[in-house]
Image: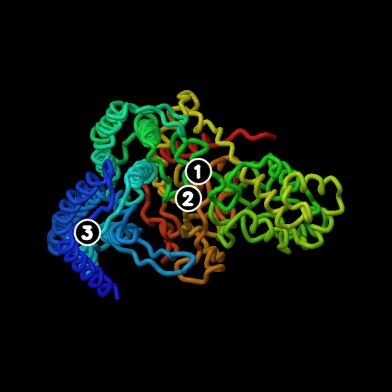
């Protein structure tokens, strides 16, 4: 089946190539830099085609009798990946489905809501095999992947037939490429074994520079002033060019992955570059957002307004009246079946909206619910709610919790009837929902109000946030080291993605990630016991979701112990140790679908401590 798919792709690509030759390439628009971007893509595909052939040759020469052949294959993989990074921004933006061939994660993914399996393919699959236990035994599978890469790379220019991209789209593609560098490449997200993320980041930024050349010239000719719709000052082309050059120089001078100072890179180079690029695009009046959930008017990706809460099934604009009503409802015991429990029973403000228990006390006051009550801080910034992601927004989660016999055991109709009899509530609902004059007190409005309150639980005022915004005394040197480890060697940032450090996948921030970690039922790593919770499998009973759980934020993690879906770990030190050992599979538990690498991270005690103190720097100041 897989080989047939490859043949179909190759035949289709060849057919398109013939059409290109016969009919000629057309872009269909007059522009500043589209033709330049296409030329850069063609140059990049030529280099990628060449290194793809070299990769196939290197894999074909693998021999267990000669260890140098393995080294050569790994180096060939690195070269091919590096060449691909010069065209990745263009592939990801304009030819997304084709790009999945080359750099898909080395695990079977499920394309929701269609529930189609996406087979692993490309570089990441090859990396996993080349750094696996017996790479020589994987030669046939490696050759299949190498053949797929080299064969399809030879016909990439066929994708350009009928291409009609615009300047706005080209500039959005490089904008997203820079965000990918900031949030993924420097973490080793797609090359954890090769550790080539810094060199690949250089290639990505170099591609950005090449694409921007005609726009920089256009900016000089236009005098480069602020646009009427842009509140940021106009960015001089010379300033932007200088910052790009300095960013490239820094990456070139510090290629080692483990020792790379990510904090210095971000605060001194990448984030200023993102700010200047955004201002430059806006000043040219070429802003467009066709792809992402981001607010491009934000200063940079770490700005509090970079990811708007309205992207997650909520209101587009903040509504103080709804949030105020939601805050009152949050403490309202009339939402429960016994008039004694409220949302605040399990999400206590003084405990950072968690409850300090392994799993929360059930409605009967004697038993416990299945899973740990996570903090509600930043809970609104996810595309799925509950640990297993079984509902898509806060409103649905609220209605589910109220009705759940183990949680609040409230009858929706009874709850609404009770609130309707309260004149103060009727007035507050009417103020918050003036368009519902006929029936303001409803379960829909109640869940909207509570959701508005929860979406507002995103202070973004931690010591880390202050530091990244320019206060260089907000965190100390040890916490900076911890951040660099978190985003690098420890690979935490490749699942807990910046800036929210949860499972929202950059650079588009349109999907929530689930991971299988092999979390045990106990915290004895010498005698770990299997946890029986099947996670997302209970909602979607497919093999790849067994024991899969949503990736929560680690913001405020220092204040919300215990940890994991079952509350098994009492402190952050134990959590970091668990990851350091390679999760459940690293503890020699049978976890065939584990998405976390089973390889130990080899973090020292000092390094693990530094990661913990960094996470403490993510603690917000909240109103008590």
Q: What residue is drawn where x is 59% and y is 40%?
A: 458
Q: Residue at x 15, y 62 (%)?
A: 21
Alpha carbons under labels 1 and 3: distance apart: 33 Å
Q: Which residue is mark 2?
A: 504
Q: Earlier in the sequence, mark 1 or mark 2?
A: 1
Rounded to the nearest angstrom, the CA distance separating label 1 from label 2 is: 10 Å
- For label 3, the residue is 156
Residue that badge 1 annotates: 307
Residue 318 in picture, x, y percent from top left: 62, 41
Which of disc 3 and disc 2 is earlier in sequence? 3
Q: Nearer the viewer, mark 1 or mark 2?
A: 1
Label 2 crowd bin: few (<14), some (14–19), many (20+), radius 10 Å: many
Q: Quadrant of the C terminus?
A: top right
Residue 33: quadrant of the picture: top left
How many residues crowd around disc 1 within 10 Å: few (fewer than 14), some, or many (20 or more)? Answer: many
Say whether residue 325 is left or right of residue 120. right
């Amino acid at each position: 089946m897989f080989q047939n798919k490859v043949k179909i792709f190759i035949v289709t690509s060849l057919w398109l190539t013939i059409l290109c030759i016969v009919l000629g390439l057309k872009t269909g628009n007059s522009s500043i830099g589209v033709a330049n971007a296409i030329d850069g893509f063609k140059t990049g595909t030529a280099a990628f085609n060449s290194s793809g052939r070299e990769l196939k040759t290197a894999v074909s020469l693998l021999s267990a009798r000669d260890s140098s052949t393995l080294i050569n294959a790994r180096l060939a993989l690195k070269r091919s990946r590096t060449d691909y990074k010069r065209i990745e921004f263009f592939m990801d933006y304009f030819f997304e489905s084709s790009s999945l061939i080359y750099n898909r994660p080395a695990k079977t993914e499920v394309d929701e809501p269609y529930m189609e399996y996406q087979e692993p393919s490309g570089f990441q699959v090859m990396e996993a095999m080349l750094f696996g236990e017996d790479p020589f035994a994987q030669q046939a599978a490696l050759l299949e992947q190498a053949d797929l890469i080299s064969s399809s790379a030879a016909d990439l220019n066929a994708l350009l037939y009928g291409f009609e991209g615009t300047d706005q789209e080209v500039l959005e593609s490089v904008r997203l490429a820079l965000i990918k560098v900031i949030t993924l490449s420097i973490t080793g997200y797609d090359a954890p074994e090769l550790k080539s993320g810094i060199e690949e980041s250089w290639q990505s930024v170099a591609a950005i520079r090449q694409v921007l050349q005609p726009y920089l010239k256009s900016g000089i000719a236009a005098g480069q002033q602020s646009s009427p719709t842009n509140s940021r000052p106009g960015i001089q082309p010379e300033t932007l060019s200088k910052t790009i050059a300095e960013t490239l120089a820094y990456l070139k001078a510090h290629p080692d992955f483990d020792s790379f100072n990510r904090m210095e890179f971000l605060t001194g180079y990448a984030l200023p570059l993102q700010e200047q690029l955004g201002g430059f695009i806006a000043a040219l009046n070429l802003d467009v957002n066709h792809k992402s959930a981001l607010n491009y008017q934000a200063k940079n990706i770490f700005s509090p307004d970079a990811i708007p809460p309205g992207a997650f099934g909520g209101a587009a604009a903040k509504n103080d009246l709804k949030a105020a009503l939601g805050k009152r409802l949050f403490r309202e015991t009339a939402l429960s079946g016994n008039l004694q429990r409220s949302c605040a029973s399990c999400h206590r403000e003084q405990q950072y909206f968690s409850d300090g228990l392994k799993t929360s006390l059930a409605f009967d006051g004697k038993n416990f619910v299945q899973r740990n009550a996570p903090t509600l801080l930043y809970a609104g910034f996810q595309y799925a709610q509950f640990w297993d992601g079984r509902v898509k927004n806060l409103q649905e989660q609220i209605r589910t919790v109220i009705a759940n016999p183990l949680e609040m055991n409230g009858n929706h109709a009874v709850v609404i009837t009770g609130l309707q009899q309260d004149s103060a509530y009727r007035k507050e609902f009417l103020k918050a929902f003036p368009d519902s004059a006929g029936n303001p007190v409803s379960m829909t409005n109640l869940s909207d109000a509570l959701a508005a309150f929860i979406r507002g639980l995103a202070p973004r005022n931690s010591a880390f946030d202050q530091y990244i915004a320019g206060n260089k005394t907000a965190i100390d040197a040890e916490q900076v080291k911890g951040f660099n480890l978190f985003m690098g060697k420890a690979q935490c940032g490749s699942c807990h993605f910046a800036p929210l450090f949860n499972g929202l996948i950059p650079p588009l921030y349109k999907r929530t990630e689930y991971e299988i970690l092999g979390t045990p039922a106990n915290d004895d790593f010498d005698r770990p016991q299997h946890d029986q919770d099947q996670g997302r499998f209970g909602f979607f009973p497919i093999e790849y979701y067994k024991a899969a759980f949503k990736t929560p934020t680690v913001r405020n993690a220092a204040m919300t112990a215990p940890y994991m879906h079952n509350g098994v770990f009492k402190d952050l030190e134990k959590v970091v140790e668990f990851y350091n050992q390679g999760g459940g599979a690293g503890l020699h538990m049978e976890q065939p679908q584990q998405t976390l690498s089973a390889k130990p991270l080899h973090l020292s005690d000092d390094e693990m401590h530094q990661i913990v103190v960094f996470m403490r720097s993510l603690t917000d100041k909240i109103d008590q």
